Amino acid sequence: MEEDKIISALIGLVGACNNNPKTKNTDGVIIKALAFSTAQIETGSKGLQTLIEEIYEEKFTVAPGCATCQTPCGNTSDYDMNRIYDSEADIRDLKLKILSALKELAAELYSLQKSDTMPMEYMDIFYKALSYVSFDMERDGLFTFWNEVQGTIEKIWRQIRE
């Protein structure tokens, strides 16, 4: 599934940002990539592959050593989406809800071209949520996080509608 490839690569980019400062372009790349399927973004004739290459380019700009690392630590590796699909149903469903909420918000931000004007605390939910969906978590912890995601996303929706 094309969205899986995007999420997989984005989790690697977010992992790079956990240990390295993001660039002025990172937020925009994340928003554009999350909005890809929802907003039907034009990425040229190669579409999905062009977008994934853009994610990798940004990841290697954020963490240039990762591109040539001889002993990868895994922190910036693409995520295996089967880990979500093979999870217990309630865990899988919560993680997919989180991703869906992020995609919907990202599509709106992308269409409004607001990804570079959002307060950092609001952009943080994208980084945090992409990290969290890659973690092996118990249902209660993930449900608590889902509630946090919902609250933050509601605040962002209110702000962009003003």
Image: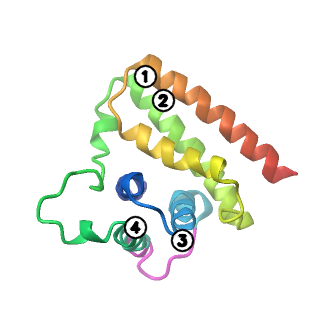
Which numbered disc, 3 or 1, marks the residue that appears first in the sequence?
3
Three-letter code for the amino acid on which mark 4 is drawn? Val
Disc number lying in front (3 or 1): 3
Alpha-carbon span between mark 1 and mark 4: 34 Å
Label whose residue precedes the other's in the sequence (2 or 3): 3
* Element at label 3: loop
**Badge 4 local density, few (<14 within 10 Å), some, or many (20+)?**
many
Which of the 4 image quarters holds residue 111? bottom right
Kindly check if marks 2 and 1 are in contact, taking CB atoms under 8 A apart as contact.
yes
Q: Nearer the viewer, mark 4 or mark 2?
A: 4
Q: Which residue is mark 4?
A: 62
For mark 3, what is the residue? Answer: 25
- Please provide the residue range marked out in magenta: 41-50
Q: Residue at x 68, y 59 (%)?
A: 109
Q: Foreground: 16 or 47? A: 16
Q: Secondary structure at mark 1?
A: helix
The CA span between labels 2 and 1 is 6 Å
Residue at 43 percent across and 22 percent down: it is 90
Check disc 2 and report the residue beneath it. 94
Q: Position of residue 27 (x, y in %)?
A: 56, 62
Left or right, 26 with respect to 50, comes to right
Q: Earlier in the sequence, mark 3 or mark 4?
A: 3
Could you tell me residue 9's position as x and y percent? Answer: 36, 59
Q: CA distance from mark 3 to mark 4?
A: 10 Å
Percent x, y for residue 136? 32, 30
Cα gap from disc 2 to disc 3, whole angstroms: 29 Å
Rendered image: mark on residue 90: 1
